[in-house]
Image: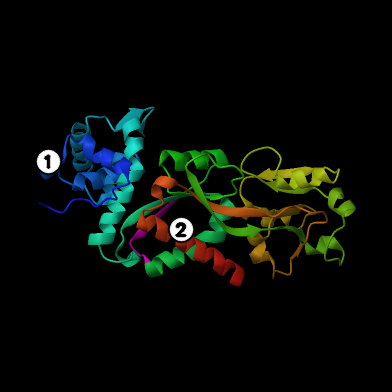
Amino acid sequence: MPTLIPYRLGRWKFRCIILVMHDANTLRGVDLNLLVILNALLMERHVSRTAARLHMSQPAVSHALGRLRHLFDDPLLIRRDGRLVPSAKALEIAPALADALRQVRDVLGPKGFDPAGEKRTFRLAMSDYGSAVLLPGLVRKLRLEAPGVDLTITQSGREAMLGRVLEGDCDLALGVFPDLPGRMEAQVLFVERFACLADRETLGGRDHLDIADYLRRPHMLVAMEDGSSEIEAALRATGHVRRIAVTLPHWGTAPRLIVGTELLLTVARRTLAPQQHDPAFAVFEPPFPIPPFRFVQVWHERRSSDPAHRWLRTALAQVSVALDED
């Protein structure tokens, strides 16, 4: 009798997988590699990405999906609006399948996870701010420890980033997410505070501004979309409103627009690291309280047990710790 996928007797969901496949005897004729492909399909929800992840051809994955549909007597993944959406049965078995494969890796596979041998592309959704703060350290770490791991970075608003993670189009979303939908997990990477940036010559020898001078100046707002920001909300709480003279979506351009003007930029402090020691600029505390924010990485629970994904999350956490040590 061949060794089958181990499972705990109390895991009724996993037993459902076995029962769906007619009876225990049918397992003798089942290629258990199909379950590895199914697990990847349920995580990626995309045939081409699954093929790339498993180092298979796209036709081979499509053929495997056909065999899986016959095996489970269920469509498993249904094309809807150009996407592959899991069926109800697929959603039911996905957690138990992932757990069963993890146990197989624990029993039969090498101990631990070797990033040096991993070949994979991760898709991260993050803002311009997140890219500037985290990517330099992350890319250096990947080149040193996991040279076969590639990154694809996308940028969009908060809801769109979460939607991409939910749909399986992104592995991780990094940013500020006050509210998370169900089945999403998150880890705080760091707590960020705000600072002001001004052309030093316009301060008349001062190293900061009081609230009256702050409000008299024109301001620059960095935002992906039109609308108020955390800064506006904090300022309104004090009974004041500032004039926004320039709104732009990328913080990287903003400091250059400050030079030679009376414009003020109030942004997350970590983005101002290059200007902190530049004599042309003054970096100082806002003259009113702005609550700090938590910068987090967010992923779907279906990816929690993936060893490569878990390693990437740990790498990002380590890069974040190093930011505070610099």
**Residue 247 location, quadrant:** top right
Horizontal and vertical percent position of residue 278: 70, 69
> Is 152 included in the stretch rendered in magenta?
yes
Residue 42 vertical placement versus 130 (above, below): above
The residue shown at (22%, 30%) is: 73
Residue for point 18% across, 32% down: 70
Alpha carbons under labels 1 and 2: distance apart: 40 Å
Looking at the rendered structure, the secondary structure element under dot 1 is helix
Q: Residues within 10 Å of mark 2 (few under 14, many from 20)?
A: many
The local crowd at label 1, few if under 14, some if 14 to 19, many if 20 or more residues have their Cα within 10 Å, is: few
Q: Is residue 110 left or right of residue 161?
A: left
Question: Disc 1 vs disc 2: which is toward the camera?
Answer: 1
Residue that numbered label 2 is attached to: 313
Residue 49 in sight here: no
Q: Which residues are magenta?
A: 146-153
Q: Residue furthest right?
A: 212
The percent position of residue 49, horizontal first and vertical second, equals 32, 45
Name the residue at 61% across, 68% down: 324
* Element at label 2: helix
Three-letter code, disc 1: Asn
Foreground residue, 201 or 88?
88
Residue type, mark 2 in image = Arg
Observer-nearest residue: 322 or 274?
A: 322
How many numbered callouts? 2
Q: Main secondary structure of the magenta part?
A: strand
Front-most of residues 178 and 27: 27
Of 131 and 117, nearer the camera is 117
- Report the quarter where the C terminus lies: bottom right
Q: Can you identify the residue that label 1 sits on?
A: 25
Query: Residue 62: x and y, percent?
Result: 22, 37
